């Protein structure tokens, strides 16, 4: 039974590892986390795991994986999220969220990050 403590330690470490994206989610969540700060999304949104002040210009971007519908009525699947992040006005012409010029790859990675929070 010498292997047991190692096994238990392994389980404990696994609990601290970054969450895996849900099945079917593409992109790199770790890269997405960096991209979020590069585009300064946290200047308008509270984002889990991203330091910043408590701002409520846009809604907090937490529990994104559990939301069914986004602003403007766009379905909250990864494609809808990417579309919103890249060009919110294409979903809702009157939205207050600016078009941030986010690249396709960055939007994919950001959506992967948000969907793992
Ligand atoms: C200037 C402020 C501002 C910035 C910067 C900003 N947003 Fe937003 N965002 C908003 C506002 C306001 C809304 C709400 C839009 C609405 O309801 O029409 C919103 C909505 C959203 C939504 C939909 C949330 C929901 O609950 O439906 C997502 C996702 C989102 N933003 C992601 C991002 C990401 C990712 C970035 C960085 C690339 C970003 N935002 C940058 C203001 C901003």
Image (cartoon, rainbow, N blue to C red):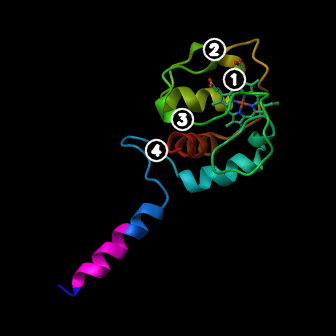
Q: Decide whether the magenta segment is chiefly helix, strand or loop.
A: helix
Mark 2 sits on what residue?
A: 72
Mark closer to the observer (2, 3): 3
Q: First in sequence: mark 1 or mark 2?
A: 2
Mark closer to the observer (1, 2): 2
Dot label at residue 88: 1
Residue 81: which quarter of the image?
A: top right
Q: First in sequence: mark 3 or mark 4?
A: 4
Residue 12: which quarter of the image?
A: bottom left
Mark closer to the observer (2, 4): 2
Label 1 element class:
helix
Q: CA distance from mark 4 to mark 1?
A: 20 Å
Tag 1–tag 2 contact (CB < 8 Å): yes
Drawn side of residue 24 relative to residue 87, left or right: left
Label 4 element class:
loop
Mark 3 sits on what residue?
A: 63
Q: Is residue 3 above or below residue 27?
A: below
Q: First in sequence: mark 3 or mark 1?
A: 3
Q: CA distance from mark 2 to mark 3?
A: 18 Å
Q: CA distance from mark 3 to mark 1?
A: 20 Å
The residue positioned 17% from the left and 84% from the top of the image is 1
* Ligand 1 within 8 Å, label 1 CB: yes
Q: Range of the magenta residues?
A: 3-11
**Residue 92 percent coordinates (x, y):** 68, 14
Q: First in sequence: mark 4 or mark 1?
A: 4
Mark 4 sits on what residue?
A: 26
């Amino acid at each position: 039974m010498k292997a047991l403590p190692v096994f238990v330690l392994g389980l404990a470490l696994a609990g601290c590892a970054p969450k895996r994206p849900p099945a079917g989610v593409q992109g790199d969540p770790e890269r997405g986390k960096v991209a979020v700060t590069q585009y300064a999304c946290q200047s308008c949104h509270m984002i889990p795991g991203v330091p910043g002040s408590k701002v409520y210009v846009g809604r907090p971007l937490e529990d994104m994986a559990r939301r069914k519908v986004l602003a403007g009525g766009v379905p909250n699947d990864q494609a809808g999220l990417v579309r919103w992040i890249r060009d919110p006005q294409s979903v809702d012409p009157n939205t207050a969220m600016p078009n941030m010029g986010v690249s396709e790859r960055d939007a994919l990675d950001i959506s992967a990050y948000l969907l793992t929070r």
